[in-house]
Amino acid sequence: VLPPPYQPVRLADGRVSLLNRSLHFAASGLPDSLQSNGIELLAAPMRLVAGIAGREVELTGEAPAELLASDDTRLELGNSGKLGDAISVALRSRSEADGCIQFFLDLTADRETRLDNLTLQLPLRRAIARYWMGMEKRGGKRQGALDWQWNGQYLNNLIWVGDVQAGVQLKLQSAEDTWALWALPLDPAMLWAGGGCRSEENGDTLTLLADTGSFTLQPGKSRSLRFRLLLTPFKPID
């Protein structure tokens, strides 16, 4: 049972709708639209880009999303895709009624593949990116640039960017739920632990770039990548 004022999660024409917010998924399984209170947050579709052998390859979808599970509280979609010609990606998203959007990716290579980096790109409209908080940035007006690196001594692997009426939080997660309060153990199997997150500004766009650093995929052995978005505000503002 959903407590008020939350409303059931609904899916229509690829757009997931919940209380005062919605998102639309591209063929890759990543959002190409994030909206809150009718305000668009994204300046362009989210992307997952890998550097392999000196060139960039982007996650592409192979088939339409499949509805995996649905009730009033959540909706789960599954996608299959490719990163270049050697890496298959199974992506699952879970959209929840409070605006929590979880992403689970499993990467499997058909031959040994060295990745120079794997970068999640979150391009935001600069007009809504007035404030930020997290990843060593004190809450307040956005100033300067973000250049954050993993440090297991601090539990600061998330950042919120936005304004009063519309915003989004990005959290880089381990493959399994971790409920640590003060520090996040750096599991060598967690791909994010080798990288960090930075920001770039170009015209009307502020892009968050979360990267893994370099790693190698062994044939037939999957590696997991997980992140979370929170769409804000969670409830109507009085």
Image (cartoon, helix red, strand yellow):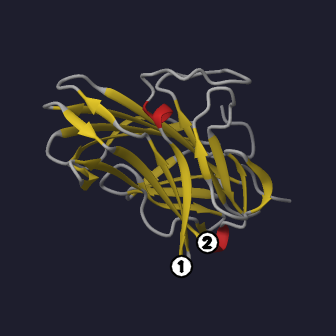
Circle 1: element type: loop
Quadrant of residue 233 within the rendered picture: bottom right
Tag 2 near tag 1, CB within 8 Å = yes
Q: Residue at x 79, y 52 (%)?
A: 139
Residue 49 in the image, given as x and y percentages of width and height: 34, 52
Q: Nearer the viewer, residue 49 or 236?
A: 49
Looking at the picture, which amino acid does disc 2 mark?
Arg
Residue 191 in the image, given as x and y percentages of width and height: 42, 32
Residue tagged by mark 1? 203
Q: Residue at x 55, y 53 (%)?
A: 198
Examine the rendering and report whether any part of residue 143 can be seen: yes
Looking at the picture, which amino acid does disc 1 mark?
Gly
Placement of 187 over or under 100, stated as above or below:
above
Q: Residue at x 38, y 29 (%)?
A: 224
Q: Residue furthest right?
A: 238
Q: Residue at x 19, y 48 (%)?
A: 84
Circle 2: element type: helix
